[in-house]
Amino acid sequence: MQHVGEVPRFSRPSAPDPVDILAPVSSDDPRLSHASAAEREVPDSIERIKALRCLSAVAEHGSTTRAAEVVHLSQPAVTRSIRDLEHHVGEALFERGARGMAPTPLGARLATRSARMQALLAQGAAEALQLSTPPPRRAPLPQRFAASVAPAFLKALLAVAARSTESAAAEALGITQPAVHRSLQALQDACGASLYIKSARGTRLTDSGEALLRRVKLAVAELRAMEADIAAWRGQVRGRVVIGALPMSVHLVLPRAVAAVRERHPEIRVTVVDGTYESLTRQLRSADVDLVVGALRAEPPSEVEQEPLFQDELAVIARPDHPCLQGADLSLQSLLHWPWVVPLPNTPARAALERAFTAAGLAPPDDFVQATSSGFTRAIVSGTDYLAFASMGQARRDERAGILRVVPVPMSSTTRKIGIAMRSGGEPSPDLLALLESLRLQAGALGS
């Protein structure tokens, strides 16, 4: 994971900003499914995919003539696309001279993102073809798909995936249902794989469709990052970051980090959603979530990398007047007489609980409720005789507030690594870099 000490800022005069300001979005759904309240926005720049293809081709080949051969357009069409893009951005994206065209720093940054966007679209088409059953007899080249797919086709796929019916997708896009259907069919023809199945209950993506959808979402994330790059060029850090928060992990640094970054950059909009590691990293890999904060795993999924921030101990918590606190000889064995709230299996917190009891020569509690919700855990513990494991930092805070008590029982082997999980590869956008830096600063302050 790249460590960057400062968000890119460029000394450029203020100008009318073409980048949309994103309104805050909240979600009560911890899983962020396709049809989620935190559905990611599709930036207006998706309509400029053709111009962005020209941008990366000119940046790579140094002239509109050679770029025209690569993108299969006329040289005047490529020149016009570049000029239209520069007009939209409000900046020159190339230095023009007798030896050809060289990208400016902003042009190079946008060209890199455009090339990655096209690579993701090609990868999505290739993966869709691999999963297609039966295999197509004559499959189009994935690179040709990436070079020619229309924005309307991609928007139709995203809208149908989010809403499950063509009519709902049409309403969201402001077009007719037949237009959505035509776009889906054209997308399927361009890809060469069966992408969806229609039924009385709606439109469902096939495995091929899901594979393409994931890469399309990642490609759209590059478009969002381009808009953040343009804003940073003007000295503004703005955008929207979606954070996945794991239970029993984030109370110490995440709230402070979010508050600090928004105080410094008030035009960054932050959405925080809860969920399990598996669900949140699945959404991370599809660009529905930008980063996950919480207890790290020994083996992260593919395309995910982790960065440790600090170590956290776990503690046993109870309500302040719990009968177990009245005993003179507290031990883990004595606590087995009470019901427990325990973390889900195959989580670092559950493993820490089991290690603590095993180290004491005991079997873990067998009278328990399993929960991922910190709110549920605190509620049931504060109002009943249930005991639970909790982050030591949060438990001490609740103890000072008189909400809960830390049960003073000796334990060992309850340390967990808390940190960040992000998508590997690519370049974080300026708004995401600002939040990452804020998280690192707040984590560093814990030890000072």
Image (cartoon, helix red, strand yellow):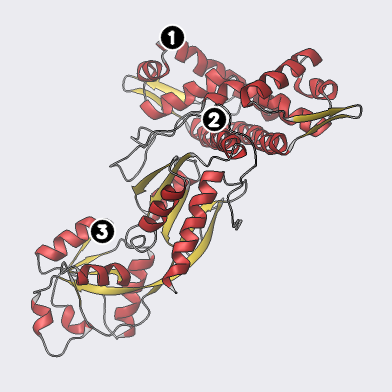
* Residue corresponding to mark 3: 374
Q: Secondary structure at mark 1?
A: helix
How many neighbours does mark 3 have within 10 angstroms: few (below 14), some (14-19), or many (20 or more)? some
Q: Quadrant of residue 442?
A: bottom left
Q: Position of residue 379 (x, y in %)?
A: 16, 59
| Mark nearer the viewer, 3 or 1 | 3
Calculate the distance from the C-alpha at mark 3 to the C-alpha at mark 2: 43 Å
Residue 133 placed where, x, y %? Answer: 54, 30
The residues tagged by marks 1 and 2 sit, at their Cα atoms, a distance apart of 26 Å
Classify the position of the N terminus by image quarter: bottom right
Amino acid identity at mark 1: Pro
Q: Residues within 10 Å of mark 2 (few under 14, many from 20)?
A: few
Report the amino acid beneath label 2. Answer: Thr
Q: Which residue has dot 1 on it? A: 178
**Residue 33 location (% of width, % of height):** 37, 38
User: N-terminal of the two: label 3 or label 1?
Assistant: 1
Say which of 43 and 185 sits in front. 43
Residue nearest the observer in this picture, 301 or 436: 436
388 above or below 117? below
